[in-house]
Image (spheres, rainbow, N blue to C red):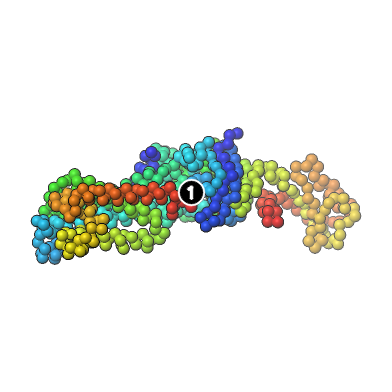
């Protein structure tokens, strides 16, 4: 694995004195997909903007493919494609001109075949001669992606790529991301949809108040913190957990009409069979059984709660 | 140099111009014709000649300057203000381009448009009056330098402006008065002595005077001074733009 993007103690204080990044350190490996999660105002966009050259860093270093973003900005920026959070497009230009412009701006020679294949892939080809004002929001988002891909970047930043995008299109977008990854493109995306991170990311980073709280392999993260629960609903409410079940570490649900058993999905023995046997032996009758797996969302919420505490 | 980027910006900006080519062409033709009707016919019947040149011909260089300067400023200021307004400036800031390349693209396109308008006006004028150009090379040089330097000024205004009103403010309150008071339609020698002195603080005087010299071989101020003035103005604008990009003033937070 080679590190393609290295961020060292990156700090950003805006003109009004607000400290939006408080020393972020992060290495991103070539070809991986990293999802950045964090509440509004956490500093996700600021982090991306600073790496891309839209805002100037107040401290720290960033290098892209070994090129420093300040002293060797041309080489660094040539490798990066950016899809911004805001739908920023010149309203009266055509789709095709807008995308061609981006390629030229990044110093690439004109290549109509490449542009065509991108527009086709993003289902924009039949809109190529339309003005931006004639597009829907989801289409505009895809034009931004087409612009970012027009110059064949090695690293792609997607700042909330699926905000305001319908379910079908979101799935399409995930597929596009997967294809790009297969082509060896490194992808950093921010999102508020945890299921999105869960679906496509290799690693997940959580940012809050300008600090990176954690970066971890998605599967490790889920395995470490991912717990499964069984909730057994009873026909007769209980006032307390029966003696016979005391050693099972059960919790009582609200109202006492259910028992909650928490176990580790990765453990060799989950103890479910024993649990059900013991419940039957204790003379309780079941009405229903539900299982729940904690998602990244729960992990994320827990993490932010811990941070606030 | 990232020539592809300069070309991309230039073409993108020119595309807007070509989309509205008819407008771009008709409005200078119309306004020039109007000026000839008003100034040439109405005033020209009272002022027959200025320093040996018919009044109609005398106002042509001023007329060209007036349009070229306004057009260069408005095109360049709009060209860079609009990306700030729509947010598309993010792309310029994240692209592998330096300030010189951005300026060459935007200012080059704005100067080209202004030049086009200047030529249209000259051609229109030649239908109304007998025009002879004493120093064609100098004429072209002055025209080019004017397009360029005022496009640079427009670029600065576009970066400075934070709303559409401000975009109009400088041209309206400063530039247009300076052009009208800069001897576009009269010779400085026609003014009372005190006003002549005051007028010499108006930088546009040097431009129009030099430009008029290239047509008729006569000038209000020495031609060398005119050249120096416009060169100094160009350098000043370039310096300001260099500073803007170095500090990120009003473009990069
Ligand atoms: N130009 C600016 N000047 C001053 N403060 C700013 C500026 N841009 C952003 N901020 C502040 O920096 C903080 C981080 O903003 P940022 O846009 O990076 O958040 P984010 O994580 O992308 O949030 P969201 O999920 O809402 O997009 C916020 O408190 C914001 O108010
Ligand atoms: Mg954001």
Q: Residue furthest top?
A: A1
Which residue is the site of mark 1? Answer: A54
Q: Is residue B107 left or right of residue B121?
A: right
Could you tell me which residue is drawn at 32 percent across and 56 percent down? B74
Does any portion of residue B33 appear in the rendered image?
no
Q: Is residue B227 left or right of residue A276?
A: left
Could you tell me which residue is drawn at 22 percent across and 50 percent down? B225
What is the chain letter for disc 1?
Answer: A
Q: Position of residue A168 (x, y in %)?
A: 55, 50
Could you tell me which residue is drawn at 20 percent across and 59 percent down? B183
Could you tell me which residue is drawn at 38 percent across and 49 percent down? B241
Q: Position of residue B1 (x, y in %)?
A: 38, 38
Which quarter of the figure has residue B84?
A: bottom left
Element on which disc 1 rests:
loop
**B235 relative to A154, above or below:** below
Check the picture and name the quadrant holding the C terminus of chain A. Answer: bottom right
Does any portion of residue B210 appear in the rendered image?
yes
Q: Nearer the viewer, residue A116 or A141?
A: A141
Check the picture and name the quadrant holding the N terminus of chain A. Answer: top right
Q: Position of residue A227 (x, y in %)?
A: 74, 48
Q: Nearer the viewer, residue A221 or A7?
A: A7
Ligand 1 within 8 A of label 1's CB? no
Q: Position of residue B124 (x, y in %)?
A: 18, 54
Other-residue count near label 1 (Cα within 10 Å), few / some / many at <14 / 14–19 / ≥20? many
Q: Nearer the viewer, residue B235 or A290?
A: B235
Q: Is residue A298 left or right of residue A253?
A: left
Which quarter of the figure has residue A267?
A: top right
Count of numbered marks: 1
């Amino acid at each position: 694995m080679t590190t393609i993007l290295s961020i060292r103690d990156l700090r950003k204080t805006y003109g009004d004195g607000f400290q939006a990044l408080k020393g972020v350190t992060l290495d991103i490996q070539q070809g991986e997909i990293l999802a950045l999660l964090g509440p509004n105002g956490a500093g996700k966009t600021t982090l991306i903007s600073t790496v891309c050259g839209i805002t100037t860093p107040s401290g720290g270093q960033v290098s892209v493919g070994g090129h420093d973003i300040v002293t060797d900005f041309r080489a660094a920026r040539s490798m990066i494609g950016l899809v911004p959070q805001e739908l920023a497009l010149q309203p009266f230009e055509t789709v095709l001109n807008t995308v061609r412009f981006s390629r030229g701006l990044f110093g690439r020679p004109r290549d109509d075949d490449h542009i065509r294949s991108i527009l086709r892939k993003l289902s924009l080809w039949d809109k190529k001669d339309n003005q931006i004002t004639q597009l829907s929001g989801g289409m505009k988002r895809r034009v931004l992606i087409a612009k970012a891909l027009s110059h064949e970047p090695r690293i792609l930043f997607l700042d909330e790529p699926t905000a305001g995008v319908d379910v079908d299109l979101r799935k399409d977008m995930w597929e596009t991301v997967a294809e790009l990854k297969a082509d060896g493109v490194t992808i950093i995306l921010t999102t508020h949809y945890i299921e999105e991170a869960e679906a496509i990311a290799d690693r997940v980073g959580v940012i809050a108040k300008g600090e990176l709280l954690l970066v971890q392999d998605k599967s490790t993260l889920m395995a470490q913190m991912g717990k499964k629960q069984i909730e057994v609903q009873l026909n007769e409410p209980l006032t307390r957990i029966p003696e016979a079940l005391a050693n099972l570490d059960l919790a009582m649900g609200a109202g006492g009409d259910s028992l909650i058993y928490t176990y580790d999905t990765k453990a060799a023995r989950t103890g479910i069979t024993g649990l059900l046997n013991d419940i039957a032996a204790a003379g309780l009758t079941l009405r229903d059984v539900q299982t729940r797996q904690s998602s990244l969302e729960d992990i994320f919420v827990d993490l932010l709660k811990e941070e606030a505490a | 140099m990232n020539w592809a980027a300069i070309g991309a910006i230039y073409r993108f900006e020119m595309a807007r111009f070509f989309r509205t080519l008819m407008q771009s062409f008709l409005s200078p033709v119309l306004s020039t014709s109007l000026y000839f009707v008003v100034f040439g016919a109405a005033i020209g019947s009272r002022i027959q000649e200025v320093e040996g040149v018919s009044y109609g011909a005398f106002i042509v260089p001023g007329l060209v300057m007036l349009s070229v300067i306004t057009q260069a400023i408005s095109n360049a200021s709009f060209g860079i203000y609009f990306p700030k307004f729509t947010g598309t400036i993010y792309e310029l800031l994240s692209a592998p381009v330096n300030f010189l390349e951005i300026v060459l693209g935007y200012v080059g396109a704005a100067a080209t448009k202004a030049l086009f308008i200047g030529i249209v006006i000259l051609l229109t004028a030649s239908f109304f009056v007998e025009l002879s150009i004493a120093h064609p090379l100098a004429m072209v040089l002055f025209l080019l330098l004017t397009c360029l330097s005022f496009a640079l000024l427009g670029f600065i205004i576009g970066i400075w402006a934070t709303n559409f009103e401000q975009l109009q403010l400088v041209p309206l309150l400063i530039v247009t008065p300076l052009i009208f008071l800069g001897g576009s339609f009269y010779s400085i020698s026609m003014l009372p002595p005190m006003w002549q002195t005051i007028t010499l603080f108006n930088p546009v005087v040097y431009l129009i005077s030099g430009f008029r010299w290239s047509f008729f071989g006569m000038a209000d101020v020495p031609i060398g001074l005119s050249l120096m003035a416009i060169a100094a103005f160009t350098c000043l604008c370039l310096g300001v733009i260099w500073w803007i990009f170095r500090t990120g003033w009003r473009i990069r937070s």
